[in-house]
Amino acid sequence: VFFDPDETEQGVTSGTAPETAASRMFVWILATTALLLSHQSAEGFTVPSSKVFHPANRWAIIKVGNSLYLSHQEAETTKIDTRPIEEGINGSSIAVSSQVESDQEVFSWTKQWYPIIPESYIEDKKPVSLTILGRELVIWKTTNGEVSVLEDSCPHRRAPLSTGKIVGDQLACRYHGWEFNTTGTCTKIPMDASGKFAGKFCTKSYHAQVKGGLLWVFMSNEQVSPPPLPDEAVGMQDSNGWVAYLSPTSFLSLIENSFDPTHAPYTHEGSTFGCSPENAQAMERYEFTVPLSKTGFTLEHSAYQQMPPVAPDVVTTREFIPPCTNKVKSPFFTAILHFVPSKPGETLILGNFGGSSQKNGGPLQKLLPKRLQVAMKDFAQFWSLTSDGQYKFNMQDKLNMQGQDARKVRDKMWKDMAPTTSDAGVKAIQRWMGRYGSFGPFPLEELDAHRGRDISVWDSHGKMCSQFQATIGRLARVKKATRKISTISIGVSLFGAAASTLLMALGSIRASLRLLTPTVFFIALSVGARALAQFCSKLIERVFVTKEVDPHLRMMEIYPS
């Protein structure tokens, strides 16, 4: 795969002369021969510049999975603004300024802090299972409030610890009852009468800390002290406003999509957010305010949708903070989005748009009992996540990005056409991934691992969120209670109808009419209770439904006719 994010089909936009086919073949043979002779991993193996190449360029062989990738890396960062370049490239307004890049060290995807779950989702009643960077983790909280992250595998028989139960400050495996403390050390083996094996076994533990309403985990396998958690990645959002869900879409496509705002009027047409192609306008400016480096970059762009006269000059900034954060600031909202690589073709998304899911709804709600307030807040979030509008919005993105992943894997190419100003964000993130990130944490050929796949709301959100689970439990209890009420009401109404009929036959018309009112009431109560039970049942069913249908049928479902 020849990957050069700075090159388009029409030519090289970086200002360097395109190499000949012979020179490319020469560097491929040279690099491959050197690789085979070195008998070492290809990661970071660099072939120095040769006379046949531009002296500012570098070439690298990168091994991803079982494939070898030849990467062309320029010793420059690109600045994209509205100054036109040579005519003939589709009217592009992409200009390039040179800035020598001194830090060419390959970015380590494991030696990083990752946010993996909102703190509010974790409770001391049951552990949570998550997969980050392909590693299965179990997250649990002791009754004292200490949070621990361990490898989700019992060293005894490899059973998942996430199916276990929390006993005080220990996590007990469900298979044979082995108990582990927060550092992963096995402290108790029930079948060991002598007690001599206690403390002799352990499962891997990870450095973890809670900050800004999220649980952060340092994913390195090495036994090293992690660096401090960067404050800029944590942000200043409301710590209670986080929402997390899993998407069957690749990390690269999702992070690129977050730097491509102009997709919204077209991709999300007909969604509940009011997006429409009629409101789209050409983006005039999308440029670096902080240049590309190993620590990320910041871009600033003008409006891409028609704005009201009171706010004609809207400017939005988008900041990429490796490994997975996009901070968005506009006059209307501030958002922090974390796209955490779960496994190939699957990404955990954590978002905070400055609002709080825990704030009181108003003065009237404050008058309600505390438990009812909590139940109402949890149900509001439940309703939002299971709504048709949310399903449509997510499916519109998913349908396009899964197709994107499949075609890029099929074509063995991750570069895109980027001729317009609005493409600057995608171009920047692709350049960063090519220059520092080794094309992401997973092999490119596996990025469409979940092509055409949908997952239920339970798998994407419910199984990790204690609040969501509590709402399902409440709905189940309401469903059970209303069915009982309906059954009892039917019995009472039948008895009342029979008694009323009997009194009518005996000539006691007045007594018969007096029974008629409560009989009608219980009939109405029965009908209402049955309807509420069915409503609760449908809400619960929507949580576990997976819609695996043909993409063309999905298109008919999520877009206007």
Image (cartoon, rainbow, N blue to C red):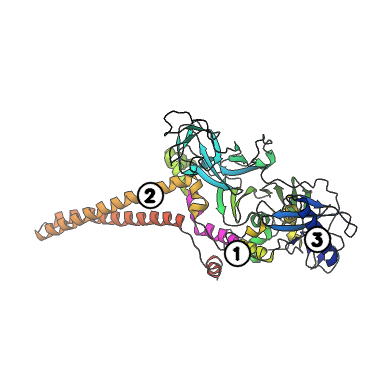
Residue 382 lies in the magenta-colored region: yes
Q: At x 64% / y 55%, what residue is drawn? A: 254
Query: For the residue marked with disc 2, what is the amino acid?
Result: Ala
Q: Give the number of the mark in front: 1 or 3.
A: 3
Helix, strand or loop for disc 3: helix
Q: Which residue is mark 3?
A: 29
Instruction: Locate residue 440 relative to residue 37 in the image: left or right.
Output: left
User: Disc 1 versus disc 2: distance between alpha carbons?
Assistant: 35 Å
Query: For the residue marked with disc 1, what is the amino acid?
Result: Glu
For residue 269, the mark is 1
* Chain part drawn in magenta: 380-400
Q: Position of residue 290 (x, y in %)?
A: 78, 47
Mark 2 is surrounded, within 10 Å at the Cα level, by few (under 14), some (14 to 19) or many (20 or more) other residues, namely: some
Secondary structure predominantly adopted by residues drawn in magenta: helix
Mark 3 is surrounded, within 10 Å at the Cα level, by few (under 14), some (14 to 19) or many (20 or more) other residues, namely: few
Q: Give the number of the mark in front: 1 or 2.
A: 2
Task: Locate the C terminus and report the quarter of the image it occupies.
Answer: bottom right
Q: Position of residue 223 (x, y in %)?
A: 65, 36
Q: At x 79% / y 57%, what residue is drawn? A: 33
Q: Compare residues 419 and 12 and report the one nearer the observer.
A: 12
Which badge, 3 or 2, is on the more N-terminal residue?
3
Mark 1 is surrounded, within 10 Å at the Cα level, by few (under 14), some (14 to 19) or many (20 or more) other residues, namely: many
Q: How many marks?
A: 3
**Which residue of the protein is positioned furthest toward the left in this rendering?**
506
Q: Compare residues 454 and 335 and report the one nearer the observer.
A: 454
Q: Compare residues 309 and 477 and report the one nearer the observer.
A: 477
User: Disc 1 versus disc 3: distance between alpha carbons?
Assistant: 49 Å
Residue 453 lies in the magenta-colored region: no
Q: Which residue is mark 2?
A: 476
Query: For the residue marked with disc 3, what is the amino acid?
Result: Ile
> Within the image, what quadrant is residue 427 found in?
bottom right
